[in-house]
Image: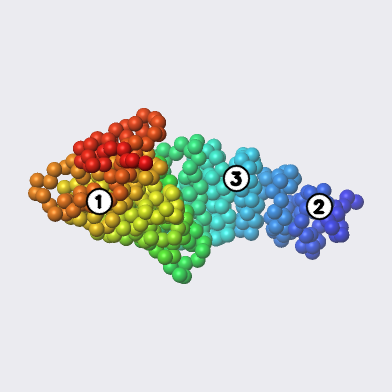
Amino acid sequence: MDENNIGNITIELYGLTLEEVSKIPACLTYDRKIPKALLRGLHAEDLQIRRIAVTTIRKIEAVQAVIDAGLVPSLVSLLDSEDPCLQSEAAWILANITAGTTQQTNMVVEAGAIPKLIRLSASPSEDVSDNAVWVLANIVGDSPSPRDRVEDEGGIDAFVRLLDYTGTTPTKVQRRAVWAICNYLSPWPSNNLSVMKINHLIPCLARYIQQTPLDEATSEDDKESIEYAVRSLSRMIDRRVQLSDVIETGVIPRLVQLLGDPHSSMVLRRDVLHGIGYLLEGDDDDADVVIDAGLLPALLTLVEGRNHELCQQALYHASNIAVGSQSQIHAFLDCGLLKPAVRILLDDFSPARCRHEAGWTVANLSTRISGDEKAEQAFMEGGGVAGLSAALLLPDHGAKELAVSGITILFDVQDSEGSQSRSSLLAAIRSSSAPQNLRAIRYSRRGGLEDHKLREACRTLLTYYLPEFSKRARV
């Protein structure tokens, strides 16, 4: 009689009983194959034997062995079973397979799994629904071709329905659906999703972000799910969906709140910063929505924090606000962002990337305050002159050029009213290290057209406004 050896246990293939199949350990045979007794058990008429067989195969966690045994079609067929245990275990194994290579994922797709999985995503069984969505999430996150197959079959709409049914969809399944949408929006170079295809995802994601609490009682799974939802929304904004559609959901205040929430992870804050950056780069009305929601205090917290990546991103956004409307510039100055930006700029031990963004922030601001007495006074009191002088020494050519432009504008605009603040500001520039730094740039020996233009700008500035510094310093 044909036999199959598994460790020191011998199982007869014929007359397989429930007791015998229960004794089969969850491991491969000596020749790295799925035990034949389990393969027979998978097709047994006895439901209990089938359950134990498929569960044991799942526990073996050997994707290639499952494929080599030709089990993919059988597992896909089990999705049509009326037994939730068989459905769940089969989907679990398929999830492991689709977590592998594109070739392995395509085997599951070609076996006809997609429509069955979409149907099971709405199963009343939490485990069945969760595992079905898990497989679909792996498929849409693999590559554009299988992703499109899921979309064409209605899989993305199924994810949306799971998020919309907040009263009936189990929390675990909702989390999985959020992750699936995030995979669907993966930023591959070849991911050619159009705005028309993804626009309908905005409301459900915004609603999930707004309704999912984040506090000390929030589980790690829920925290991760909020991260996926925010990242999904950020990826959609990346694809240039209408910013007004995002704003109309009312999600912006919640995003800003998450940015400053002490329970938010670094990853979550980074994704929030990425998404709201597009609003700051839009028109003034879009930027005002974010600023009015409390963005500036949140940015201040990040700039003064210890995470250099978040500090850099926060300063980048601050630099965009610094060239905004007059009301935005006043809000920037009122919140106290200038002082920490200057402090970072003057600190040689601060990370170069943070000093770079701080330089742009101060230089941008210097180009927009001339003629505004309140802004000029706040700029001077916040250490803006020292920061502007330091920006001239940054290796970044653009920051240097902008700083020169800012100093030129401050001198160039005639103050017909002769305000005290402006006179004090120009006097502060003259007495700072800015003239010496301008002269250093003017007489530097660096080549290139851009460097030549910058030297000429410094020469003009020194000649007209700071003639006492226009000549080369003695060495």
Which quadrant would the C terminus be assigned to in this image? Answer: top left
| Alpha carbons under labels 3 and 1: distance apart | 75 Å
| Alpha carbons under labels 3 and 2: distance apart | 28 Å
For the image shown, how many numbered marks are present on the structure?
A: 3
Who's the residue at 32% across and 60% down the image? 297
At label 3, counting other C-alpha atoms closer than 10 Å, the crowd grade (few under 14, some 14-19, many 20 or more) is many
Who's the residue at 70% across and 57% down the image? 59
Query: Can see residue 67?
Result: yes
Q: Determine which residue is flagged by label 1.
A: 431
Q: Determine which residue is flagged by label 2.
A: 29
Above or below, 243 relative to 16: above
Q: Position of residue 378 (x, y in %)?
A: 22, 56
State the SS at label 1.
Answer: helix
Q: Nearer the viewer, residue 164 or 199?
A: 199
Structure colour scheme: rainbow
Q: Position of residue 187 (x, y in %)?
A: 48, 42
Q: Determine which residue is flagged by label 3.
A: 113
State the SS at label 2.
Answer: loop
Query: Can see residue 363?
Result: no
Specify which label sits upstream in the sequence, 3 or 2. Answer: 2
